[in-house]
Amino acid sequence: MFSFDASARCAVRGDALPPGQRAVKGWPVSHYGPVPRFRSDRWNLQVFGATATGAKHAWTFDEIRKLPMTAVTADLHCASGTTTLGHEFFGVPASAVLDLAPPAPDVTHVMAWAEYGYSANMRLVDFTSEQTLLATHHNGEPLTVEHGFPLRLVVPHLYGYKGPKWLRGIEYMTRDRRGFWEERGYHNLADPWTEQRHSYQEDE
């Protein structure tokens, strides 16, 4: 069992469900494509793109585990209409990544990259949220492979497709471009509290 300081927890609007959502039990497994195999000797997390210095940053998994850690308690909302409640994630806060690898002043968005080229774009303000976490643990245990081991991006104030499993990179961008699901008809912003599910709603 992994232990952490419970005082670091941060709740995310757990007193109500977003409109159109229904609570379900457990934590259903949902992803596109196969589950990747973790190879510790080949794995790293990279931060690249419009960094403040122009340099690429990279950490091995052992180095990731030595970075500042915190815990977040949050509900997870799927754009299909299901919500699972009371998840307890532990990992590296996005703010620690931003401190170690600062973005250039004109960065407005980030692209989160995962295994097999999966990607999810979001505004920099969403990535810098105090709830955004690069998770290594869930409910006191290391993430399972099916749920994103060794590293999963958790952005609980957005729909789940903005939080890729098997995270491998963060790209700083000076303009927005769509990620994997956003190119396939999902909303570019993905706020569950205003039901931003589909791209056709962006014209409203």
Image (spheres, helix red, strand yellow):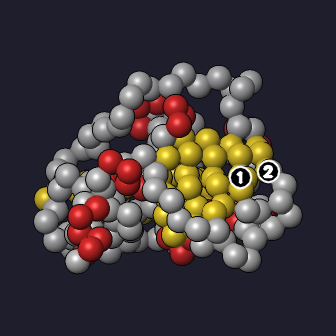
Labels 1 and 2 touching (C-beta < 8 A): yes
Q: Is residue 86 above or below residue 11?
A: above
Residue 201's x, y, as percent?
Answer: 23, 69
In the image, 134 versus 114, the foreground residue is 114
Quadrant in which residue 124 is drawn: bottom right
Residue 47 is labelled as 1
| Distance from Cα at disc 1 to Cα at disc 2 | 5 Å
Is there any visible trace of residue 199 in the rendered image? Answer: yes
Above-or-below relation of 18 to 150: below
Crowding around mark 2 (Cα neighbors within 10 Å: few <14, some 14 to 19, many 20+) is some
Q: Whole-percent x and y of residue 2?
A: 55, 44
Q: Secondary structure at mark 1?
A: strand
- Give the residue at x 58% y 61%: 110
Q: Pick whichever, 53 or 166, lies toward us.
A: 53
Disc ID at residue 27: none
Q: Amino acid at mark 2?
A: His
Residue that appears at 31% across and 38% down: 30
Vertical position of residue 68 compared to residue 202: above or below: above
Mark 1 surroundings: few (<14), some (14-19) or many (≥20) residues within 10 A: many
Residue for point 63% across, 53% down: 170
Q: Give coordinates of residue 43: x percent, y percent.
A: 68, 31
Q: Is residue 166 above or below residue 128?
A: above
Q: Is residue 120 found left or right of 105 in the rendered image? A: left
Tell which residue pokes out farthest to the front in this image: 203
Q: Position of residue 199 (x, y in %)?
A: 28, 62
Task: Check disc 2 and report its element: helix, strand or loop.
Answer: strand
Q: Answer left or right for 93 relative to 83.
A: right
> In this image, 141 relative to 12: left or right?
right
- Residue type at mark 1? Val
Q: Which mark is residue 57?
A: 2
Task: Tell which circle, 1 or 2, labels the residue nearer the N-terminal end.
Answer: 1
Q: Is residue 141 visible?
A: no
